[in-house]
Image (cartoon, rainbow, N blue to C red):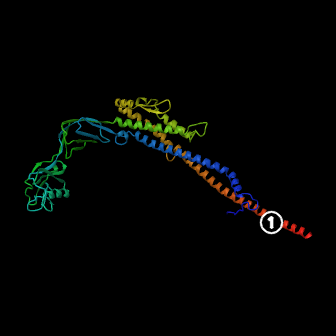
Amino acid sequence: MATASIGGLASGLNTAEIISQLIGLESAPQLKLKGQLSTEQTRLSALQQLNARLATLAATSGSLADSSQTTGPWSTLKATSSNSAVSVTAANGATPGAFTVTVGRTALAHQLAFTDAHAKSDVVTGAGTDVVLKRTGQPDVAISTTGGTLDQVAAAINAADKGVRATLVKVTSSGAGDSYRLLVESTTTGADGTFELTAADGSPLLGGATVRAGRDAAITIGGIEATSSTNTFADVTPGVTITLGSTATGSSDVAVSRDATSRSAAVKALVNDVNGILDAIATATAHNADATKAGVLSGDSTLRRVASGLAEAVYPADGTSLSAYGIEVDRYGRFTFDEAAFAEAYAADPDATTAAITGATGFAARVEKVADGASDKYDGTVTNAVSGKTAAIGRLSDSIAAWDDRLAMRRTTLERQYTALETALSQLQSQSSWLSSQLSALTASKE
């Protein structure tokens, strides 16, 4: 409960300033606790950042450790074609191999080029205003053109969206006006796109049409012909898709191989991630006699053990070396990766190179084990350090709050004491004044 004080009313002292100075002296332990809290919060933030990076490293190294040929970074395949008009892609799970593709024909859309040329405003549909779209085995589709002009016929066909599109091609230009011919083609390629377009009564439209029949694309692989209604042959062999350019001819040598470049990039990325964490740990735990220059987690043994574990991950359990695959440790304790050495090793023995990096005992798995052991959300060593630091910060905050209550009570006590002092001094001053007045009155009466 707050207590009113009479600041120096009788004594002339600045009691409010005196109380504040006394509280300042008595709050020294709390200020020390606040300094510790700030330091611990900084350390906690550094630990949390490193723990997050270790968790990410555990995930990426775990992914690289998976040597699956269908998922993950180790599954990527590279497909090449010797013919620029024949493109090839290989999905994960495709089987590495090589074969020759011979282009038989490309796919075409069915097309009608109508004979008669007219102005756009000429009525061209005969007695009616509809045109009829006919396909084998399907009901006829009547398309209303409103007025039956050439321009309206083209617009109505496109608006109907029935799997064909119309274009007007200008063939003559004169003072009397421009003349156009109607071109209609299927929106899809392949032999199944065949259609007819007639007047409403079934008579030829615009003097009939020159037909370019739709056709399927065809390729030959090892004497076996494959066809497709489009220029794309999906899964022509498991996981392999071949696409023909519109002008594709001749043959193409196709190869599907393991993509050493992508694997090299994945290993390099892992090495860079490990180096980044090693550098971060070294900076955070650096020792210096001058505390202002030391790392924020100077001397932290948990992090030093993590760094040591990561550095040792480069050494296989059988005592061999990864230098043949381009991975080494330099004199500064940082990992190095030689892409050329990796590529050479992979070309010479892809299985051995894969085994050195992937699998339960490969380099990536050893890195994962260390990173996961540190960052596991339940019992990771760095996770536990984060939890311990969080608990310590909670205790410090409670102690600081307790000091707030203690100092508030002390201030109240001091205010009461100084108020009592001022009151007592005021009473004494009042009594002194009364005595002085009585003495003065007594002296005056004697005279």
**Residue 417, image x, y percentages:** 74, 60
**Residue 327, image x, y percentages:** 43, 32
Q: Nearer the viewer, residue 82 or 345?
A: 82
Element class at badge 1: helix
Q: Residue furthest front?
A: 447
Left or right side of 58 for 9:
right
**Residue 69, image x, y percentages:** 34, 40
Image quadrant in which you'd find residue 87 = top left
Image quadrant in which you'd find residue 78 = top left
Quadrant in the picture for the C terminus: bottom right
The residue under label 1 is 430
Looking at the image, residue 103 lies above or below residue 116: above
Quadrant in the picture for the N terminus: bottom right
Left or right side of 25 for 250:
left
Q: Can residue 361 be seen in this view?
A: no
Total numbered labels placed on residues in the image: 1
Looking at the image, residue 15 lies above or below residue 337: below
At x 89%, y 69%, the residue is 444
Tell me the crowding category of disc 1: few under 14, some 14 to 19, or many 20 or more residues within 10 angstroms, Cα based.
few
At x 13%, y 62%, the residue is 147
Q: Which residue lies furthest to the bottom in this view?
A: 445
Q: Which of 45 and 314 is in front in this view?
A: 45
**Residue 232, image x, y percentages:** 23, 44
Looking at the image, residue 97 lies above or below residue 116: above
Q: Is residue 49 visible?
A: yes
Q: Which of 198 and 171 is in front in this view?
A: 171
Residue type beneath disc 1? Ser
